[in-house]
């Protein structure tokens, strides 16, 4: 099959905009919670009704009006994920303006580029440190009227400043935009080059969220309808979630620090989770390390294998009596504790941003949490397709959501069409033209469609490695499997124009102490671990297991363990936790050359 379409469930009238979603929520369940907030240092969550949230939105929108923001102006938000982010975003839309998110980790150069390219008129940042970053480039952004700091009372200041603005003015501005108008400009964090500003319209978010709400009712309406947002709101997936909860009737919580994620999940108790694969990997690895610390690692691994086997059996007619008994025991000993660590009320999770991998997909379903994989890009307002509760095919990202179409081009590239596809790149008509082919958006990803219209992503078109022998290798399969090892943090597979495939591997500093303890070894640094024989042997065994998924020509023959991890802080990860492959290959050319040095010497001889 080379094309599949899912008809829309809901068609949105052209005069609507995102403000109508919030107003509808207030009209239907205004006195019920829309959000719960937990301030810094607090231990409990405080409910915020839809009506009270809307009143705050109007008050802040008045502040933007008083500050000189006109309909269609651009307002920037630079902050970690927190309640105020959602408040500011909806307030920008209520003021008739366009929001422009900036990652809180952005450098001065990146801030300058986005503020200039997007012509940001007003900027709200989280901290004085962020304000200082903006100060470095303020002279290059003459159109910027003001900078407000959340931690210094920006919300209260805007509210006071807008006290004289009438309710009628905000009501007028809320009606100003139509579906086709731009709602936000999201700059792709990018693995290469200067980020491009994807202009996403009110229709992109509106049509996507109302149709997703209808199609995913079983997920979104499960239990108390609660989800916790911990991804950066500058990322399109998080923005999609914070809009989705409004028509879905969900309650949204925010947490800015993934280091306290398990603690926040336990206290907030979400009924569904939306995340990236790395978080699911971390939960698995931390659970294994905790079991190891308690001398129960063998029980944990047995339980994990049982969960995976149980899930696989569900796809083959169901588990037999013996496996069901084993699963019951595994649940009592281990699996229920993992559910509790995730909040205890979850039945479903949606994973996006990268491949989750079949192993983790089956593991979590065996635990009792069905992880539905989704696929999308900034340019498609996040999800184009999502696995469905009634059509789970682990290893695929499901069929297109209602209103979406997917086509596989002759070279395997995934093409996308639908009301969720962006308007174009800001101030970049050449890039916009290159991104489309006869109305279809070129994703740059490679994939296939099965007989049910379920999409399987096999790699990035630009990341395909062609070995010296002419073998085309998709690195994602190898990288995803090798990252499953508790010691492994990141993997970059290399081998373009080389005689064999190799990999650069970084170690997980958080997982190292637990692994060392489990294996009866003394504490050591990451720098020492990359040269430790037992560590090397364990990683090598993981490589051999990984290679079972591919042919010999595609298998990893050598690895180089690096003493430094790839992080957002050192520039090798995007804020959405994707490795900047081209940058790694450029900066680690010496390590790559060393891998192939023996072969090159042999050739010279």
Image: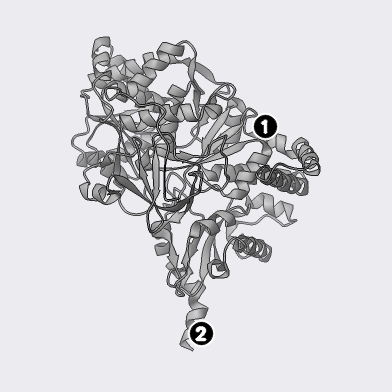
Q: Could you say which is closer to the camera, residue 401 or residue 513?
A: 401
On the image, the x and y values in percent for residue 254 come to 49, 28
On the image, the x and y values in percent for residue 468 come to 45, 74
Residue 225 visible somewhere in the drawing: yes
Q: Could you say which is closer to the camera, residue 277 or residue 379?
A: 379
Q: Is residue 460 left or right of residue 435?
A: right
Give the residue number, with chain letter if any, for mark 1: 340
Label 1 near label 2: C-beta < 8 Å?
no
On the image, the x and y values in percent for residue 21 come to 38, 21
Q: Which element type, helix, strand or loop, lies under badge 2?
A: helix
Q: Which element type, helix, strand or loop, lies under badge 1?
A: helix
Q: Could you say which is closer to the camera, residue 245 or residue 527?
A: 245
- Relative vertical location of residue 508 with respect to residue 266 in this rendering, above or below: below
Are there few (<14), some (14-19), or many (20+) residues within 10 Å of tag 2? few
Numbered label attached to residue 602: 2
Separation of marks 2 and 1 at Cα, in angstroms = 56 Å
At a point 80% along the width and 41% down the height, the residue shown is 321
**Label 2 vs 1, first from the N-terminus:** 1
At a point 18% along the width and 37% down the height, the residue shown is 142
On the image, the x and y values in percent for residue 548 come to 62, 62
Q: Could you say which is closer to the camera, residue 388 or residue 433?
A: 388
- Relative vertical location of residue 453 with respect to residue 202 in this rendering, above or below: below
Colour scheme shown: one colour
Q: Quadrant of residue 409?
A: bottom left
């Amino acid at each position: 099959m080379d094309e599949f379409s899912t008809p829309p469930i809901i068609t949105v009238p052209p005069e609507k905009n995102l403000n109508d979603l919030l107003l509808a929520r207030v009209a239907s369940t205004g006195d019920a919670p829309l959000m719960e907030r937990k301030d810094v240092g607090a231990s409990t969550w405080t409910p915020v009704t839809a009506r009270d949230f809307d009143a705050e939105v109007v008050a802040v929108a008045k502040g933007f009006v008083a500050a000189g923001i006109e309909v269609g102006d651009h307002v920037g938000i630079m902050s970690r994920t927190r309640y105020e982010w959602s408040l500011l975003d909806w307030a920008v839309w209520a003021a008739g303006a366009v929001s422009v998110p900036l990652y809180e980790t952005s450098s001065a150069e990146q801030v300058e580029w986005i503020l200039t390219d997007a012509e940001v008129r007003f900027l709200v940042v989280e901290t004085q440190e962020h304000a200082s970053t903006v100060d470095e480039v303020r002279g290059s952004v003459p159109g910027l009227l003001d900078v407000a700091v959340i931690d210094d009372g920006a919300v209260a200041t805007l509210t006071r400043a807008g006290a004289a603005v009438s309710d009628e003015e905000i009501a007028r501005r809320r009606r100003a935009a139509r579906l086709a108008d731009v709602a936000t400009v999201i700059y792709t964090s990018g693995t290469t080059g200067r980020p491009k500003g994807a202009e996403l319209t009110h229709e992109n978010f509106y049509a996507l969220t109302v149709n997703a709400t209808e199609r995913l009712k079983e997920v979104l309406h499960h239990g108390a309808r609660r989800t916790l947002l911990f991804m950066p709101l500058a990322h399109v997936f998080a923005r999609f979630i914070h809009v989705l909860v409004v028509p879905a009737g969900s309650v949204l919580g925010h947490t800015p620090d993934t280091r306290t994620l398990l603690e926040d999940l336990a206290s907030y108790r979400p009924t569904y989770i939306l995340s990236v694969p790395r978080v699911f990997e971390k939960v698995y690895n931390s659970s294994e390390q905790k079991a190891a610390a308690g001398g129960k690692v063998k029980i944990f691994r047995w339980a994990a294998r049982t969960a995976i086997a149980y899930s696989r059996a569900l796809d083959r007619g169901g588990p037999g009596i013996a496996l069901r008994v084993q699963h019951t025991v595994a649940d009592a000993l281990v699996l229920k504790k993992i559910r509790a660590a995730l909040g205890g009320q979850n039945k479903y999770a949606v994973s996006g941003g990268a491949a989750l991998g079949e192993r983790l997909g089956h593991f979590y379903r065996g635990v009792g949490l069905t992880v539905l994989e989704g696929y999308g890009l900034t340019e498609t307002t996040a999800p184009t397709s999502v696995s469905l509760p009634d059509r789970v095919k682990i290893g695929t990202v499901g069929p297109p959501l209602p209103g979406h179409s997917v086509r596989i081009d002759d070279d395997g590239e995934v093409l996308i069409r639908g009301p969720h596809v962006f308007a174009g790149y800001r101030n970049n008509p050449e890039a916009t033209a290159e991104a489309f082919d006869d109305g279809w958006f070129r994703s740059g990803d490679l994939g296939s469609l099965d007989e049910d219209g379920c999409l399987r992503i096999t790699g990035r078109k630009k990341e395909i490695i062609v070995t010296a022998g002419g073998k085309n290798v998709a690195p994602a399969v190898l990288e995803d499997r090798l990252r499953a090892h508790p010691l492994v943090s990141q993997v970059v597979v290399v081998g373009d124009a080389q005689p064999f495939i190799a990999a650069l591997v970084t170690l997980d500093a958080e997982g190292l102490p637990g692994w060392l303890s489990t294996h009866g070894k003394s504490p050591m640094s990451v720098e020492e671990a990359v040269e430790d024989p037992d560590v090397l042997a364990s990683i090598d065994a993981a490589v051999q297991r990984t290679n079972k998924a591919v042919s010999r020509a595609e298998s990893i023959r050598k690895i180089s363990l690096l003493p430094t991890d790839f992080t957002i802080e050192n520039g090798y990860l995007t804020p959405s936790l994707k490795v900047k492959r081209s940058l790694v290959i450029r900066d680690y050319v010496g390590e790559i050359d060393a891998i192939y040095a023996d072969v090159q010497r042999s050739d010279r001889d």
